[in-house]
Amino acid sequence: MAPLTMSDTSVTTVRGLPVNPGYRYLTAADLPPLMVVPDPRGSYRYPLLQFIADWNRAPDQAALIADVPTYDGDDPLLLPSIAVIVHALAERAGVPIPEWVYAHRAPHEVVLFVPDHYRAYRQWLIERSHPLSAYHRVHIHPRLLDKGTTDWWLPWD
């Protein structure tokens, strides 16, 4: 069997990306329990990157952020990390931003996915962070939002 290409009419696409019609997209409400699972690369990394990739392929992006994510633990950065991603994705897509997003701000400046001891890289990223990062105090590179798109591997700077 020949591999599928983007020009095949049998491949469902959303915004030019191939979509599996039976796939269940991660929602913002799905994220908190996934983000507390220990991971040597950082507990937030896989769930947030998968959420971003799912967002970029989802036919109904608003449905992914309709339910409020809840968290009972003691990590003060978990919900603000979800909020900055949702805020930035929704703004970019022109999707109404849910009210719950505005309630979540980190208690101090954080750079997502960058350990504290990488001071020079942290500063580099803060200088280039998404404009909404300042509100949530969780800094992300704007290109992080391209995960799952054809632009993901282009140079970031």
Image (tube, rainbow, N blue to C red):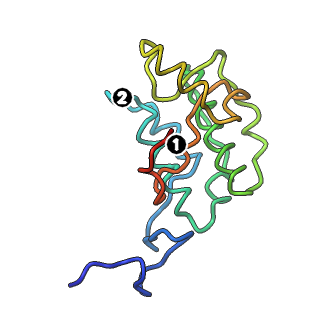
Which of 90/8 is in front? 8
Q: Is residue 97 above or below residue 118?
A: below
Residue 99 appears in which quarter of the rendering?
top right
Residue found at x 66% / y 24%: 137
Tell me which label, 1 or 2, sits earlier in the chain.
Answer: 2
Residue found at x 47% / y 78%: 12
Q: Residue furthest bottom?
A: 9
Residue found at x 45% / y 44%: 155
Label 1 Cα neighbours within 10 Å, binned few <14 / some 14-19 / many ≥20: some
**Disc 2 marks which amino acid?**
Pro
Q: Which residue is mark 2?
A: 38
Q: Position of residue 3 (x, y in %)?
A: 26, 78
Q: Which residue is mark 1?
A: 144
Q: Is residue 139 left or right of residue 136?
A: left
Residue found at x 70% / y 27%: 134
SS state under label 1: helix
Q: Is residue 48 above or below residue 114?
A: below
Mark 1 to mark 2 CA distance (whole Å): 22 Å
Q: Is residue 60 left or right of residue 148?
A: right
Check the picture and name the quadrant holding the N terminus. Answer: bottom left
- Which mark identifies residue 122? none
Q: Position of residue 105 (x, y in %)?
A: 70, 26
In contact (CB < 8 Å): disc 1 and disc 2: no
SS state under label 2: loop
Which of 142/31 is in front? 142
Which of 59/124 is in front? 124
**Disc 1 marks which amino acid?**
Leu
Q: Position of residue 93 (x, y in %)?
A: 68, 57
Q: Is residue 126 above or below residue 60?
A: above
Q: Is residue 99 left or right of residue 75?
A: right
Q: Position of residue 148 (x, y in %)?
A: 46, 55
